[in-house]
Image (cartoon, grey):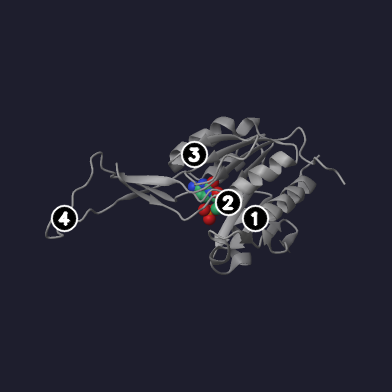
């Protein structure tokens, strides 16, 4: 038993949603409380790591001893992560990143009309895939991804792990864990599928940190 399995390691995480403006007062976002990512940041810190958390807007306090970089948009999150990824030993992408941003976002508040005519038509442009970009770095960190699915978890999760070319992907069923305090994680690696017991998000995070530490190349 090693009490500090991540001593001397640098862990970079993303957490929370990203927020994409439509105009100065309206946004498009994803549902994400940030609880899992913040719990993992805390668990990694407890395990002895130096932890940096790039976070979209959440209602959560910064975990003790963790450096937090607040961001709003996926492109800001991408920039903050890429600036720090080469210094990290482990990257854990927990954020619910918006897949698209609004290409024709307005710089002034859009006004509605009495008649309801002239409703805006939004045009979308894809956001960068932060996890895939970090996984592509030469000599980059050991990468962990998350997949929240509503169905076919095993199939989608293994496909996603291979597509993003990462050693470990953590799956959960979105409707079970969204906003909840408990979670049920399933690990997918090159040896297959490993379900973890249902647990509170902090206990699940501590278990996941132990699973990551056990898989790190020495
Ligand atoms: O492709 P998908 O969004 O389903 O993959 C989820 C995983 O990829 C999560 O780990 C998420 O944080 C990460 N991701 C990312 N950048 C994106 C989209 C997803 O880092 N633009």
197 versus 78 height, above or below:
below
Query: Of the residues tagged 3 and 2, which is closer to the observer?
Result: 2
Q: Which residue is mark 1?
A: 201
Is there CB contact under 8 Å for labels 1 and 3? Answer: no
- Compared across the picture, whether 197 is left or right of 85 comes to right
- Compared across the picture, whether 104 is left or right of 147 comes to left
Quote the CA–CA distance across marks 4 and 3.
Answer: 33 Å
Q: Is mark 3 within 8 Å of ligand 1?
A: yes
Of mark 1 and mark 4, the one earlier in the sequence is 4
Quote the CA–CA distance across marks 1 and 3.
Answer: 23 Å
Q: Which residue is mark 4?
A: 118
Q: Identify the secondary structure beneath mark 1.
A: helix
**Quadrant housing residue 172:** bottom right
Q: Which residue is mark 2?
A: 35
Q: Is mark 1 within 8 Å of ligand 1?
A: no
* Residue found at the far left of this picture: 115
Is there CB contact under 8 Å for labels 2 and 1? Answer: yes
In the image, what residue occupies the spot 60% across and 52% down? 36
The percent coordinates of residue 105 (x first, y second) are 29, 44
Quote the CA–CA distance across marks 2 and 1.
Answer: 7 Å
Q: Identify the secondary structure beneath mark 3.
A: helix
- Which is nearer the eye, 197 or 195? 197
């Amino acid at each position: 038993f090693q009490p500090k399995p991540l001593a001397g390691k640098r862990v970079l995480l993303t957490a929370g949603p990203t927020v994409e403006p439509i105009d100065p007062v309206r946004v498009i976002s994803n549902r994400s409380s940030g609880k899992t990512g913040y719990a993992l940041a805390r668990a990694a810190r407890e395990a002895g790591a130096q932890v940096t958390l790039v976070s979209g807007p959440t209602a959560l306090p910064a975990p003790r001893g963790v450096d937090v970089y607040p961001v709003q948009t996926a492109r800001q999150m991408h920039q903050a992560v890429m600036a720090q990824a080469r210094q990290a030993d482990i990257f854990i992408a927990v954020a619910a990143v918006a897949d698209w941003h609004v290409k024709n976002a307005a710089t002034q508040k859009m006004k509605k009309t009495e008649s309801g005519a002239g409703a805006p038509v939004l045009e979308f442009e894809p956001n960068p895939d932060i996890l895939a970009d970090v996984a592509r770095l030469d000599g980059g960190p050991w990468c962990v991804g998350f997949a929240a699915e509503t169905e076919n978890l095993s199939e989608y999760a293994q496909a996603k792990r291979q597509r993003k070319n990462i050693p470990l992907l953590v799956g959960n069923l979105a409707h079970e864990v969204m906003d909840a305090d408990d979670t049920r994680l399933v690990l997918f690696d090159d040896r297959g599928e490993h379900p973890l017991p249902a647990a509170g998000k902090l206990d699940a995070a501590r278990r996941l940190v132990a699973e990551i530490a056990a898989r790190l190349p020495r």
